Image (spheres, grey):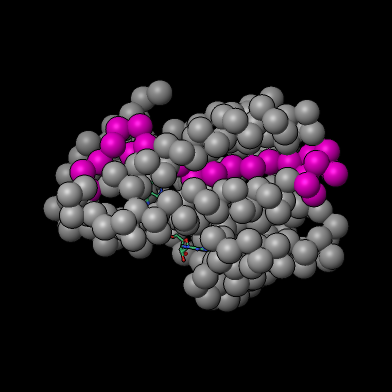
Amino acid sequence: MKRLEGQIVIITGGARGIGEGICEVFCREGATVALWDVLDGKEVVTKISEKGGAIFYQKVDVTNQESVDAAVAEIIEKYQKIDVLINNAGVIRDRSFLKMTREEWDVVMSVNVDSLFITAKAVVPHMKAANYGRIISASSINAYQGAFGQANYCASKAAIVGFTHSLCKEVGKYNITVNAVAPGFIKSEMSDSMPEEVIKAGIAMIPVKRIGTPEDMGYAYLFLASKEAGFISGHTLHANGGSMPS
Ligand SMILES: NC(=O)c1ccc[n+]([C@@H]2O[C@H](COP(=O)([O-])OP(=O)(O)OC[C@H]3O[C@@H](n4cnc5c(N)ncnc54)[C@H](O)[C@@H]3O)[C@@H](O)[C@H]2O)c1
């Protein structure tokens, strides 16, 4: 039996990087996945569908309540439920603090933090009605250790942990768990944009001596999304190859 057989899952930011890895792993495990992104997700949908995965693309901006509500309404009309919400979409606007603009701060807060309010507002009522749900959001190792030029990003990823701790206390009685994954250094367009020597130095500091893959992250999310993880809530799973033992 596949672990997510018959489950309806939303994965935000699924058009590339870690989100694509989560889509792949979840589809292999039998989920029906709604891939949400502002980028075109059709290529990922075609690739995964050709391998037999059940996945469809909805163009959704997670900073926009109407966009999210419309996509949720479509899913509910077709499937009558949402079992899992993965808040993976995120952005960086790195700059040292004295040069950072208010706009760079606001964009990061909007996509990385406001989006959690927006998606949860739309999805939690349906999970409550079904008396079942899994909500898992992307934090980061940098929420815990900080990073030069990332005051906005680190603040946003720490906020996600606070949101997770709080929401889990409110919705646990509806059999909804709320957790976060804090990825370490993972191969993606985000990390590919870094200079090669920075990537090499980063890998040298990881105890397992390799960069993480989107598929590695897919399995971390899969564990928390599974029915078997029903007694784990308010937790942040550190998936970083041992870089920051927790
Ligand atoms: N790559 C890493 O090393 C790393 C480490 C720690 C945490 N993370 C976190 O994991 C998540 C995924 O990271 P990634 O490296 O795959 O990033 P990525 O930039 O490759 O992918 C992010 C996706 O989110 C989408 N997105 C951005 N704004 C959106 C919006 N308003 N609405 C809908 N979709 C939107 C993008 O279009 C993109 O497809 C992010 O939240 C990131 O902060 C990544």
Is residue 236 visible in the rendered structure shown here? yes
Provide residue 224's location: percent of width, then percent of height.
Answer: 61, 37
Q: Residue at x 36, y 25 (%)?
A: 245
Q: Is residue 207 above or below residue 76?
A: above
Depth check: give the residue in front, 33 or 171. 171
Q: Is residue 214 above or below residue 146?
A: below
Find out whether residue 128 is within the magenta segment: yes
> Residue 199: horizontal and vertical position, in percent?
22, 51
**In the image, residue 8 above or below residue 147:** below
Residue 76 covered by magenta stretch? no
The reply to whether residue 182 is in sight is no
Q: Nearer the viewer, residue 43 or 236?
A: 236
Most foreground residue, 131 or 7: 131
55 with respect to 161 (left or right): right
Q: Residue at x 21, y 43 (%)?
A: 148
Can you give x and y, in whole percent of width and height, for residue 20 in the image? 51, 60
**Identity of the residue drawn at 33% across and 29% down:** 244
Q: Residue furthest front?
A: 102
Quadrant where the C terminus is found in the figure: top left
Residue 142, horizontal then vertical, whole percent: 33, 39
220 w.r.t. 218: above or below: above
- Left/right placement of residue 89 relative to residue 206 reads right
Ligand 1 occupies quarter: bottom left
Extreme residue in the left direction: 197
| Quarter-of-image position of residue 70 | bottom right
Stretch in magenta: 125-149
Quadrant where the N terminus sits is top right
Horizontal arrangement in the rendering, residue 108 relative to residue 133 (left or right): left
- The total of numbered circles placed on residues is 0
Residue at 49% from the left image edge and 35% from the top image edge: 161
